[in-house]
Amino acid sequence: MKQVDAVIVGAGFSGLYLMYRFLKANRTAVVLEQGDDVGGTWYWNRYPGARCDAESLAYSFSFSEDLEQEWSWSERYAPQPEILDYARHVADRFGLRPHIRFNSKVSSAHWDEAAGVWTVTSDQGESFVGRHCIMATGCLSVPQLPDIQGLDDFKGERYQASLWPHEGVSFSGKRVGIIGTGSSGIQSIPVIAEEADHLTVFQRTPNFSVPAKNAPLDQTWVEAFKAHYPAHRHNHRIGNGSGFGDLDIEPKGAVEDPILFSDVSEAEAHDLLEAAWQRGGARFMAAIGDTMMNQTANDFARSFIHKKIRSIVKDEATAEALCPTNHPVGTRRICVDIEYFETYNLPHVRLLDVAKDPIQQVTETGVQTASEHVALDVLVLATGFDAMTGALLNIDIRGRNDRALSDEWAAGPRSYLGLMMADFPNLWTITGPGSPSVLSNMMVSIEQHVDWVCECLDWLDEHNHQRIEADRAAQDAWVAHVQEVAEGTLFPKGGSWYLGANVPGKPRIFMPYAAGVGPYRIICDEVAQAGYRGFIVDAAEAAAS
Ligand code: FAD
Ligand code: N01
């Protein structure tokens, strides 16, 4: 069995960029991917209306100036097929495909302490040996099916947003039902409604959503924006927030102090939110800088969105049912929509509030709630993911002394910087729990993690070190810090998948790091500059000598 420097699991954007960096550094690697093409999220999630909610020009790689200049995005928020094309282009342009093994689902990864290598095995029994194992398995890559009785009894067509058929689906002339009103549901509902004969939305929890204001990109504007790309990218990386893009052609010179709710009158706060609403996009949350910390500021934003929903949706009862009241704005990922609320004004679209009239079971012909049977030809499930830990725990990962990651994480994920775990030498997680990951523009976070890991590998080689892992005390301190930061925000009040709340039995731990991509980057850089503080190198050799 040929040994490589790293076995990389996953060929989404994380795996692609890792392979690029490995080739550039003349390191050997193999990427194992369960799907039959690259793209990860954008390979699997082909549901109607799927697109990014970070602006295309920001939701893209920055590592190659040629790539960012030559690639042309067509819309403010790129649609899924275009993002998938982009991933394919990256794989081809940089010669990554020969290093990727498709249709190769990893079932186990075991550390061999004596040899200092990982043996990574696919479900077809093929094994690969690497000095390092890098999990680029994605935060939102394991679909979560709802626990609804009779789901498999349905005799009509059943589809899941995150496993959408490649050949597409026709809704024409059909009675369609959809369960789930998170981002996937909110993106797909207006598009399905355009085609379906009748659409019933089974909503258990309404979500906050802001208009995308999507539009084709003006290519003159794009050229002007691209002329300033390095400064824009710099701003995405150093900001206190999520690393989302800014639409101004001229990049801001320095990070501006955010406007706090206490800095402005209510009328001014309203104007700031209105301007952000009109501008469109998730940066609505940044219009007032303490919306995620200050309950009063959050209540103000909540009431602002409620008024918007009531002004758009004509039927009063439907409008009320669409107004979220059980969580602060942003504590579940804010959705970015195209005509979502407007869709409920269409005569053939109906909102069924299953919090009030619960789903009892799926039958052969539809959905039975407490009070009625809804006959359906098609049932769409947009019920989310076993996020952040699901893909890692699906693999039998064993570190030193055969220690299972599933045991280590039984009470919730524990990781140092979201990058490494104690007693799992040379095992890396890209955008792992404990890093900003899903609270950020993921392209910014992916590039930062991959760059950091690759620079660490250079450092290990320069210093002739073979192994590295998290120090348990540093890991414990980091886990406590991640929780402390989360407690200083309103996030824990969301009852969201950020906390594992959508998966029965999953420990309730706030998983991402909420301090922002800029502060996180500074910490990671300081750790590296201090000789990888909080990491242990060559632990086994030290113990033996
Ligand atoms: P993924 O793209 O999830 O890729 C992981 C890959 O690992 C997958 O191909 C998977 O098949 C593979 N894999 C997993 N387990 C195994 C295994 N055991 N064996 C082999 N292969 C395995 N983020 C944003 O910042 N902005 C957005 O607008 C945005 N939109 C999104 C829209 C949707 C519908 C979803 C679901 C997520 C979105 N995200 C967005 C988050 C998105 O997941 C990231 O932006 C990014 O694509 C993640 O890339 P990745 O390579 O880390 O993970
Ligand atoms: O999943 P979700 P998602 N009966 O977990 C409902 C990213 N993303 O795929 O809240 C009835 O948000 C559930 O109801 P409730 C983004 O990070 C981005 O939509 O549990 N309903 C909820 O409404 C996002 O946050 C984009 O009461 C049931 C829905 O299913 C993340 O992926 C697009 C149910 C699940 O919502 C996940 O989004 C898509 C049941 N038994 C995804 N079980 C962009 O826009 C579950 N639900 C870029």
Image (cartoon, rainbow, N blue to C red):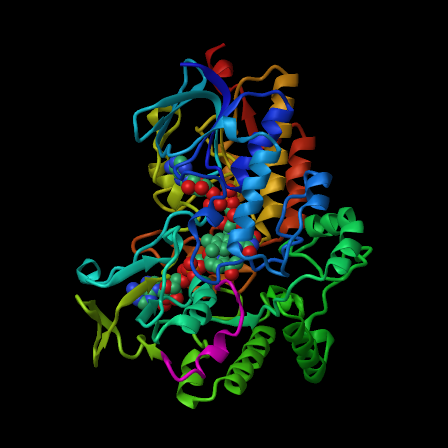
Q: Is residue 317 above or below residue 387?
A: below
Q: Where does residue 513 sit, x and y in percent of width and height?
A: 55, 50
| Quadrant in the picture for residue 279 | bottom right
Q: Where does residue 150 sit, x and y in percent of width and height?
A: 18, 62
Question: Which residue corresponds to the image point at 68% horizontal and 78% vertical from the top-left?
Answer: 269
Q: Kindly give the residue lying farthest to the top in the view shown.
A: 545
The N terminus, quarter of image: top left
Q: Choose between 484 and 208: the one closer to the eye.
A: 208
| Quadrant in the picture for residue 47 | bottom left
Q: Is residue 422 above or below residue 466?
A: below
Q: Where does residue 80 sit, x and y in percent of width and height?
A: 51, 54
Q: How many marks?
A: 0
Can residue 17 be seen by looking at this rendering? no
337 magenta-colored: yes
Can residue 143 be seen by looking at this rendering? yes
Q: Where does residue 41 sit, x and y in percent of width and height?
A: 47, 48
2 left or right of 225 in image: left
Question: Which residue corresponds to the image point at 51% horizontal and 38% vertical from the top-left?
Answer: 475
| Quadrant in the picture for residue 249 | bottom right
Q: Choose between 137 and 303: the one closer to the eye.
A: 137
404 left or right of 315 in image: left
89 left or right of 415 in image: right
Q: Is residue 123 above or below residue 321?
A: above
Boundaries of the magenta span: 332-350
Question: Which residue corresponds to the image point at 42% horizontal and 49% vertical from the top-left?
Answer: 44
155 left or right of 411 in image: left
Q: Choose between 506 and 106: the one closer to the eye.
A: 106
94 magenta-colored: no
Question: Which residue corresponds to the image point at 46% horizontal and 78% vertical from the top-left?
Answer: 343
Q: Choose between 392 and 359: the one closer to the eye.
A: 359
